Image (cartoon, grey):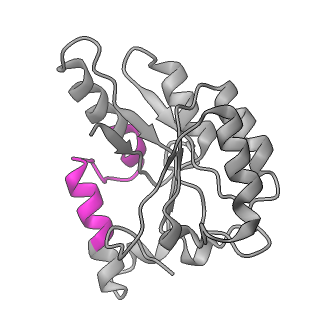
Amino acid sequence: DTHVHVIGDGDSGSGLWFNPRMSRLWNVQEYVRRKIYINAACIDDSPGRIDLSFMEHLLAQCRAMPPGFKPMLFAFDWARDEAGAPIKEVSTYFASDEHIGGLVAKHPQHFEWVASVHPYDPKALDRLDAAVARGAKAIKWLPTAQNIDPANPRCDRFYAKLASLKLPLITHAGDEQAVVGF
């Protein structure tokens, strides 16, 4: 398994985002979760260094691997309400398709990528086309964290579009510990 969730706080202008509650000591569980992410990714968390140090460390690891090794960088869409609007207050983090696709375009020798398109987003089908056009290899959902009901008939058009694009859906269900769920 060579999938990588790209994390950061947007300090480089990347658009990466951590929920601000994760930086508040009085939200102990969320504060510790963020610290674990930062530590596990060997990130320099000094101001202005989070986004860049994540990528510097990841690129160094990739360069040390045998030729042909390419991890999949995962985008991660917002949790969304029933109308498809982002719910930032309950989202844990966000990594846009544009940013992740851009990293892969900048470093194609090292990475492939997986888009994250929420099926309730009114632009979901157009976003799927855009992701494929930019080289996405799959779509990532985390239903419990993104407020997705995979059995809801409103997802049927999304599934049909995935099938027509021959794009796999990567998802898992059950109790989620890495991010806050619904």
Classify residue 49 as left or right of residue 105.
left
64 in relation to 26, above or below: above
Classify residue 172 as left or right of residue 66.
right
Residue ranking furthest to the top: 67
Using the image as rendered, state which of residue 33 and residue 13 is in the foreground: 33
The answer to which quarter of the image holds residue 59 is: top left
135 in relation to 116, above or below: above
**Residue drawn where x is 27% and y is 48% of the image:** 43
Which stretch did the figure color magenta? 33-53
Q: How many marks?
A: 0
4 in relation to 172, above or below: above
User: x, y (%) of residue 87?
Assistant: 65, 73
User: x, y (%) of residue 56?
Assistant: 31, 31
Q: Quadrant of the N terminus?
A: top left
**Residue drawn where x is 26% and y is 24% of the image:** 62
Using the image as rendered, state which of residue 27 and residue 88 is in the foreground: 88
User: x, y (%) of residue 30?
Assistant: 35, 77
Classify residue 162 as left or right of residue 46.
right
**Residue drawn where x is 65% and y is 40% of the image:** 163
Whether 28 is among the magenta residues is: no
User: x, y (%) of residue 49?
Assistant: 37, 45
Using the image as rendered, state which of residue 27 and residue 87 is in the foreground: 87
The answer to which quarter of the image holds residue 150 is: bottom right
The answer to which quarter of the image holds residue 3 is: top left
